[in-house]
Image (cartoon, rainbow, N blue to C red):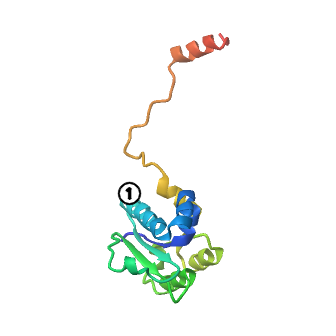
Amino acid sequence: MLPHYIIDGYNLIHAVPSLKKLLVRDAAQAREALIDHVARLTHRKKFRGTIVFDGVRPAEDFGASRAPIHVVYAAPLTADDKIKALIEHAPNRSWLVIISSDHEILNFARVCACTTHTSKYFANMLFETDTSGEEKEQSTLSKSQVDEWLRLFGEK
């Protein structure tokens, strides 16, 4: 079974400077960019994701496919209350990973045996480079290289 990440959408947008700027100009575009980033991460890190946004689903958003991400608009609840409800109704809370900047939500999730991360931590995950398959460059110097450096800097 894959971990299921439940993400407070606007908290995460505010944790990514470029998305935060975009949110001011075009909220729909900021949400789309966030969904795209999280979808790409699900393929690299192998998890299921639900992004919860405050408010009602915009008219232009109805019927849009978001696979592998499930997008939820919380109205009439707040995103925080919707996340709590998702946690409460989860059949296996230990598989949930809650992403939020709200300490009340993170504390609630911990009490419910969920894993938690701050939005800032997850934002860093979104943009980290995956180097797991790359060969690491040898960084050890040979004795002759060390001698050359010592000679150049007047130590030998």
Determine whether, in the image, residue 155 is placed left or right of residue 75.
right
Question: 10 Å neighbourhood of mark 1: few (<14), some, or many (≥20)?
Answer: few
- What quarter of the picture does the C terminus occupy? top right
Where does residue 105 sit, x and y in percent of width and height?
A: 60, 77
Residue 93 vs 146, above or below: the answer is: below
Where does residue 114 sit, x and y in percent of width and height?
A: 52, 75
Could you say which is closer to the camera, residue 104 or residue 57? 57
Q: Is residue 99 visible?
A: no
Residue 143 vs 35, above or below: the answer is: above
- What quarter of the picture does the N terminus occupy? bottom left
Q: Residue at x 43, y 61 (%)?
A: 37
Label 1's element? helix
Could you say which is closer to the camera, residue 114 or residue 11? 11
Where does residue 111 sit, x and y in percent of width and height?
A: 59, 79
Residue 61 vs 138, above or below: the answer is: below
Tag 1 residue: 44
Q: Residue at x 46, y 64 (%)?
A: 34
The amino acid type, in three-letter code, at marker 1 is Arg
How many numbered discs, if any?
A: 1
The image quadrant of residue 15 is bottom right
Task: Point out the residue furthest to the bottom here.
Answer: 76
Could you say which is closer to the camera, residue 53 or residue 91? 53
Where does residue 26 sit, x and y in percent of width and height?
A: 50, 67
Q: Residue at x 50, y 57 (%)?
A: 125
